[in-house]
């Protein structure tokens, strides 16, 4: 995240786009017959997993403070469901 790609606003947008594209490519490479759903509270994604099965992945946004130290920001959980058939 320290690598600068462009000016501040555009830099964040490009880095976010790279992350989204990479995740999409990883998902497609693993199985083209799958669907993913995003949740914020862990208990909600665990309820859906208990009902439908699937695998939970955690994505955590990392933030930098003014001293350059990283700290965890917002967390999102992705439930991947494979198509049965």
Image (cartoon, rainbow, N blue to C red):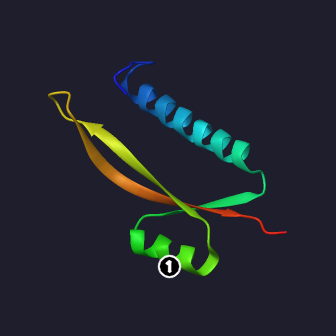
The residue labelled by disc 1 is 47
User: x and y percent of residue 84 in the render?
Assistant: 79, 69
Q: Residue at x 57, y 62 (%)?
A: 55
Nearer-the-camera pick, 7 or 30: 30
Give the mark count: 1
Q: In the picture, which quadrant includes the N terminus?
A: top left
Q: Residue at x 28, y 46 (%)?
A: 72
Q: Quadrant of residue 79?
A: bottom right
Q: Residue furthest right?
A: 85
Taking the image as shown, residue 13 lies to the left or right of residue 28, namely left
User: x and y percent of residue 46 in the render?
Assistant: 48, 73
Nearer-the-camera pick, 68 or 30: 30
Q: Classify mark 1: residues with Cα within 10 Å, few (<14), some (14-19) or many (20+).
A: few
Q: Residue at x 38, y 19 (%)?
A: 3
Taking the image as shown, residue 28 lies to the left or right of residue 14, namely right
Q: Residue at x 74, y 51 (%)?
A: 31
* Element carrying mark 1: helix
User: x and y percent of residue 69 in the render?
Assistant: 20, 32
Taking the image as shown, residue 71 lies to the left or right of residue 35, namely left
Query: Does residue 2 lie above or below 44 as drawn?
Result: above
Query: Does residue 59 lie above or below 4 as drawn?
Result: below
Q: Quadrant of residue 28?
A: top right
User: x and y percent of residue 30 in the render?
Assistant: 70, 47
Query: Does residue 77 lie above or below 5 as drawn?
Result: below
Q: In the picture, which quadrant includes the C terminus?
A: bottom right
Q: Residue furthest left?
A: 67
């Amino acid at each position: 995240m320290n690598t600068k790609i462009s000016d501040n606003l555009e830099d964040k947008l490009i880095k976010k786009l790279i992350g989204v594209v990479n995740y999409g490519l990883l998902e497609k490479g693993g199985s083209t017959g799958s669907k993913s759903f995003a949740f914020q509270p862990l208990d909600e994604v665990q309820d859906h997993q208990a009902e439908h099965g699937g695998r939970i992945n955690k994505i955590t946004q990392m933030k930098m403070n003014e001293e350059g130290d990283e700290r965890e920001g917002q967390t999102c959980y992705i439930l991947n469901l494979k198509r049965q058939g």
